Amino acid sequence: MIKALFFDIDGTLVSFHTHRIPRSTVESLEKAKKKGLKIFISTGRPLTYINNLDDIKSLIDGYITTNGAYILVGDKVIACHTIPKEDVCAMMKFSDERKFPCILVGESAALVYNTTREIEEFFHRLLDLNNISGNISLSALLQQRIIQMTPIITAEEEAEIMPCLPSCESSRWYPAFADVTAKGVDKGKGVKSVAKYCGFSISEVMAFGDGGNDTNMLKVAGIGVAMGNAGNSLKKVADYVTTSVDDDGIKRALEYFHVI
């Protein structure tokens, strides 16, 4: 029996085209909640960038954010995996030398290091984010523990840079950038942490995703569902491939497995 549902946000819960959660998804999650299921978010976004879940906010029991680096159940932080300062400094040095922007994410704020107007506009178009650099200074942000770095670099540049960050690993869910977290951090481990904390089995988890950073989450879940708009590599590891986020994909999968 499925007791908990885990959802990626962008391309899974939320459409890239409308920047909204489809009505069929909202209604399906309301039905699941009434049946007693727990509902969790599992996203690459930091908490400060989650701006598109108002329609289901009252249904959410917890958040796996920044690809598993920062996890909350209710109001309690159950995990915070920090990137060592030397790796943060190394990434900032690469950003300066190679002139690429990089999102630095602290525990409660984020900014774009070496930002440009084009990058600000890009994230507004892609994720409907305004003022992605926030209102925090670099010096103030660096007083916080850094939990994720998102350099806007190619896969080739990523392959060159990552060996110089020995305490980190990277993943991608969009071609234009990589998410860098502390080594050993991913959504799959995040799901396991939440399951252990809440007292249900990983076999009682159903997880939904569409990007490369969802791979381990779908692998560990009792039922891993890839959206129809997912890439082929994710579909290959999924237990089930549903339709796209814009074609009632979540509703169809929940009905297929008789969760609702």
Image (cartoon, helix red, strand yellow):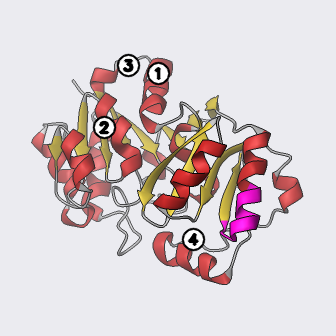
Looking at the rendered structure, the kind of residue marked 2 is: Leu
Residue in the picture at 51% in, 43% down: 67
Which part of the image, by quadrant, shows the N terminus? top left
Provide the secondary structure element on which disc 1 rests: helix
* Residue 100 painted magenta: yes
Q: Find disc 2 in the rendering and name its residue.
A: 218
Instruction: State how far apart marks 1 and 2 are (Cα).
Output: 19 Å
Q: Is residue 181 visible?
A: yes
Q: Is residue 254 left or right of residue 57?
A: left
Q: Find disc 3 in the rendering and name its residue.
A: 200
Looking at the image, residue 56 lies above or below residue 42: below
Number of the front mark, 4 or 1: 4
Number of the front mark, 4 or 2: 2
Looking at the image, residue 226 lies above or below residue 187: below
Residue in the picture at 65% in, 33% down: 80
Provide the secondary structure element on which disc 4 rests: loop
Q: Find disc 1 in the rendering and name its residue.
A: 198
Q: Find disc 4 in the rendering and name its residue.
A: 129
Q: Looking at the image, is mark 3 or mark 2 earlier in the sequence? A: 3
Looking at the rendered structure, the kind of residue marked 3 is: Phe
Instruction: State how far apart marks 3 and 2 are (Cα).
Output: 17 Å
Provide the secondary structure element on which disc 2 rests: helix
Residue 159 image position (x, y, % from top left):
51, 52
* Residue numbers of the magenta segment: 92-101
Q: Are marks 4 and 3 in contact (CB under 8 Å)?
A: no
Q: Looking at the image, is mark 4 or mark 3 earlier in the sequence? A: 4
Instruction: State how far apart marks 4 and 1 are (Cα).
Output: 32 Å
Residue in the picture at 39% in, 68% down: 20
Q: Looking at the image, is mark 1 or mark 2 earlier in the sequence? A: 1
Which of 11/171 is in front? 171
